């Protein structure tokens, strides 16, 4: 039972930290977008992409939490007997996306907020700002891939 609790704690950490990073990042970008939209409300569609981009880390954390619940049998079937060592392995497997999701979500929000400033002055360059935001995303995606590989490596 202790191993199951540790494993679920790992999934919860992934959801919590990656979601926190996304929330903060969306907050930065949303504040910048609202400032621009108060002057130019027709740019809502363009700004939506830059505001939503930091939200992907939260999705990756959510996916990780679901993968952990699925691995231990909470989504159906029989709940697995998870040893303490296996629980720690699962928790460790969740850390790449948890930590990377926290920091990349925050910094992606900052990059996207700066991109909103670019879009305000140079509307034709908004996709350049999106590309910069997507570069930060790369590291969250890599962390998610490693988390998935590590989770798949834990034998229950």
Image (cartoon, rainbow, N blue to C red):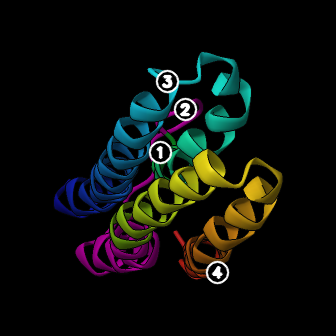
Residue at numbered disc 3: 39
The 10 Å Cα crowd at callout 4, few under 14, some 14 to 19, many 20 or more, is some
Compare marks 4 and 1 and give the one earlier in the sequence: 1
Mark 1: give few (<14), some (14-19) or many (20+) Cα within 10 Å: some
Asked whether, in this view, residue 146 is left or right of residue 124, the answer is left
Tell me: 16 left or right of 55.
left
Residue 31: image x %, image y %?
34, 37
Main SS of the magenta segment?
Answer: helix
Q: CA distance from mark 3 to mark 1?
A: 46 Å
Label total for image: 4
User: What residue is pinned by disc 2?
Assistant: 75
Q: Earlier in the sequence, mark 3 or mark 2?
A: 3
Foreground disc of the pair 4, 1: 4
Q: Which mark is residue 130?
A: none
Q: Which residue is mark 4?
A: 142
- Do the residues bearing badges 4 and 1 touch, measured as CB atoms within 8 Å? no
Residue in the image at 65% along x and 50% along y: 119
Q: Residue at x 68, y 40 (%)?
A: 49
Lower sequence index among marks 3 and 1: 3
Q: Is residue 69 magenta?
A: no
Between discs 3 and 4, the one toward the N terminus: 3
Q: Is residue 98 magenta?
A: yes
Element carrying mark 3:
loop
Q: Which residue is mark 1?
A: 69
Give neighbour class at mark 3: few <14, some 14-19, many 20+ (Cα, 10 Å): few
Which region of the structure is painted magenta?
74-101
């Amino acid at each position: 039972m202790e191993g199951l609790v540790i494993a679920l704690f790992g999934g919860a950490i992934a959801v919590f930290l990656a979601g926190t990073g996304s929330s903060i990042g969306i907050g930065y970008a949303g504040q910048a977008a609202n400032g621009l939209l108060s002057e130019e409300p027709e740019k809502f569609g363009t700004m939506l992409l830059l505001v939503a981009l930091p939200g992907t880390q939260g999705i990756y954390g959510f996916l990780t939490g679901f993968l952990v619940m699925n691995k231990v049998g909470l989504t159906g079937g029989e709940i697995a007997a998870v040893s303490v060592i296996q629980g720690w392995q699962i928790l460790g497997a969740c850390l790449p996306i948890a930590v990377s999701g926290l920091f990349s979500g925050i910094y992606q929000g900052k990059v996207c907020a700066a991109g909103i400033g670019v879009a305000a002055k140079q509307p034709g360059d908004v996709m350049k700002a999106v590309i910069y935001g997507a570069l930060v995303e790369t590291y969250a995606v890599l962390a998610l891939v490693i988390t998935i590989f590590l989770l798949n490596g834990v034998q229950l």
